[in-house]
Amino acid sequence: MKIDELNLPEGLDPKHIPAHVAIIMDGNGRWARQRLMNRSIGHSEGVNSVNRITRFASDLGVRDLTLYAFSTENWNRPADEVDTLMNLIGETILREAPELRENNVHIRLFGDIDRLPESVRRNLFEGRDLCQSCNGLNLNLCLSYSSRWEITRAVRLIARDVREGRLDPDDIDESVIESRLVTAGIPDPDLLIRTGGEQRISNFLLWQIAYSELYFSPVLWPDFDEKAFADALIQYQNRERRFGMTSEQILSLQK
């Protein structure tokens, strides 16, 4: 769908859509608990929100949508919940991949994927490969991911290159570090959204969000819909991103 065909909420400027939006999807368990349901129901309902927001972001022209689907710390949850989450993630990607391909959505997987169960990896890879040729929205799924894991991995890769003579320590700069991150080659998020009312980053994209705008929504993830997403974008559009410069400098660059 073209953006001019959308029924956009008042105040949302279709010409000022962030290129990269990252989301910490929080509140599935609390959503279920409020309804006296099993937490697994909340996770299943959360999948519907993923579908809604992915479609809407694609229609708006967002280039990268990065979702925190399963953190390194989530492995510490009760085993039955972890199993449910793992199966849900793998089955959902495989099931939704044909529709994602029809909508030209490209899938990328970030994190310690080797730690996932083999059956889950198989489903994820099959779904990803089905959308390999798509060149629309990049749907970046962070699975078994944490920023400290990512940075530690990058340090190991750099240390290995130094040890083997491929890299001089004096040549290590920000670009060298960024090239070893799992997000290498992807622009940093313009906007980071966290749902569910919590106001913390939870070990997510710590390097990449150095200059991202942060938005904390009280809406639990299963209830996060197009309007809630649009509210976050409107907030983003009403902020001035200075990147260390003054307002006057920003204005002069825009002329």
Image (cartoon, helix red, strand yellow):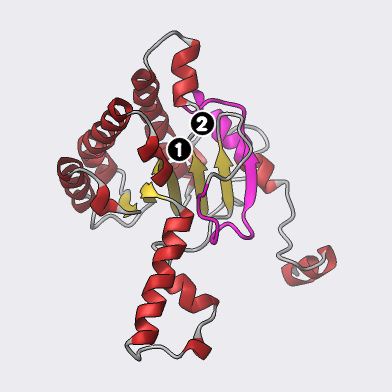
Q: From this viewpoint, is residue 202 visible?
A: yes
N-terminal label among 2 and 1? 1
Where is residue 172 shown, x and y percent of the image?
A: 50, 83
Residue carrying label 1: 56
Image vertical order of residue 153 relative to residue 31, above or below:
below
- Up/down of 250 relative to 7, above or below: below
The x and y percentages for residue 170 are 52, 90
* The magenta stretch spans residue 107: no
What range is drawn magenta here?
203-232
Q: Residue at x 82, y 66 (%)?
A: 246
Give whichever of 30, 222 is nearer the camera. 30
Residue at screen point 44% across, 53% down: 64
Would you place residue 76 above or below residue 106 in this image?
A: above
Q: Which residue is mark 2?
A: 226
Quadrant containing the N terminus in the rendered view: top left
Q: Residue furthest right?
A: 248
Residue 229 placement (x, y as % from top left): 55, 35
Q: Is residue 231 magenta?
A: yes
Residue at screen point 53% across, 25% down:
220
The amino acid type, in three-letter code, at marker 1 is Phe
Q: Residue at x 45, y 38 (%)?
A: 56
* Image quadrant assignment for residue 233: top right
For the residue labelled by badge 1, is the local secondary structure a helix, a strand or a loop?
A: helix
For badge 2, the amino acid type reads Glu
Q: Along the line of sight, which residue is nearer the eye, 135 or 35? A: 35
